[in-house]
């Protein structure tokens, strides 16, 4: 299943979560490490950081039948992944701070690996930001957040 999402959010973030789950207000959610990794993790919810200050989210979300086949990250600026448990049978994408439901999709319960690819991050600070986010998720054993490629905003 593949979804193209275009929406606005505030505070430079949006959420991917198990239906009606997750507490974004805990001190363990947006830690310094989470900010640096561009992905906050808490039980039942992930917070995805966006780069542009206008709050524009252009995103592709794909639920895969097996692990992602993407192994070459050279075309992406930043790649990070973490696990998300689905126990209520629905995946939600929500904005911040109102938690308006952008997408709600029925999926099988279980542990999912969620990988977020960040593109065109340098353009996010221009007059016409073109930052783009690709999210893939597949069933997999639960494991901690892991940065597979880190964006260095000071590199050329």
Image: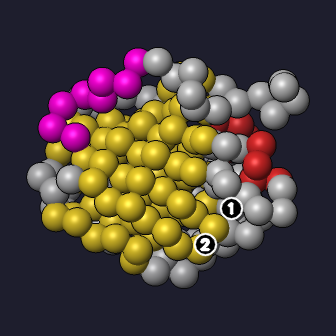
Measured as percent of width and height from the top left, residue 83 is found at: 36, 38
Image quadrant in which you'd find residue 69? top left
Q: Quadrant of the C terminus?
A: top right
In the picture, the disc for residue 12 is 1
Q: Crowding at label 2, few (<14), some or many (≥20) Cα neighbours within 10 Å?
A: many
Question: Does the magenta-highlighted stretch encompass residue 68?
Answer: yes
**Residue that extends furthest to the right in the rendered view of this protein:** 154
Left or right of 132 on screen, residue 150: right
**Residue shown at 46% from the left, 80% from the top:** 100
Image quadrant in which you'd find residue 17? bottom left
Rendered position, 91 above or below 39? below
Q: Crowding at label 1, few (<14), some or many (≥20) Cα neighbours within 10 Å?
A: some
Question: Does the magenta-highlighted stretch encompass residue 31?
Answer: no
Q: What element carries label 1?
A: loop
**Residue shown at 44% from the left, 29% from the top:** 144
Q: Give the range drawn in magenta.
A: 64-71
**Residue that extends furthest to the top in the rendered view of this protein:** 72
Residue 33 appears in the picture as rendered = no
Q: What element carries label 2?
A: loop
Distance from disc 1 to disc 2, alpha carbons, whole Å, reads 7 Å
Measured as percent of width and height from the top left, residue 9 is found at: 60, 72
Rendered position, 155 above or below 23? above
**Residue shown at 41% from the left, 46% from the top:** 135
Measured as percent of width and height from the top left, residue 18 is found at: 30, 60
**Residue that extends furthest to the front in the rendered view of this protein:** 128
**Residue position for label 2:** 9
Image quadrant in which you'd find residue 89? bottom left
| 5 vs 29, nearest the viewer | 5
- Prevailing secondary structure class for the magenta stretch in the rendered image: loop
Q: Is there CB contact under 8 Å for labels 1 and 2?
A: yes
> Which coloring applies here?
secondary structure
**Residue shown at 21% from the left, 53% from the top:** 1
């Amino acid at each position: 299943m593949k979804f193209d999402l275009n929406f606005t959010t505030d505070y430079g973030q949006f959420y991917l979560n198990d239906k009606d789950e997750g507490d974004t207000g805990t001190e363990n959610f947006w830690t310094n490490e989470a900010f640096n990794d561009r992905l906050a993790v808490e039980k039942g919810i992930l917070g995805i950081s966006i780069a542009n200050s206008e709050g524009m989210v252009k995103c592709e979300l794909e639920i895969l039948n097996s692990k992602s086949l993407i192994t070459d990250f050279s075309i992406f600026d930043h790649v990070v992944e973490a696990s998300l448990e689905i126990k209520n049978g629905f995946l939600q994408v929500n904005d911040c701070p109102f938690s308006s439901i952008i997408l709600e999709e029925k999926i099988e319960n279980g542990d999912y690996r969620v990988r977020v690819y960040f593109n065109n991050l340098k353009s996010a600070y221009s007059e016409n930001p073109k930052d783009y986010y690709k999210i893939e998720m597949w069933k997999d054993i639960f494991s901690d957040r892991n940065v597979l490629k880190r964006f260095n905003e000071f590199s050329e």
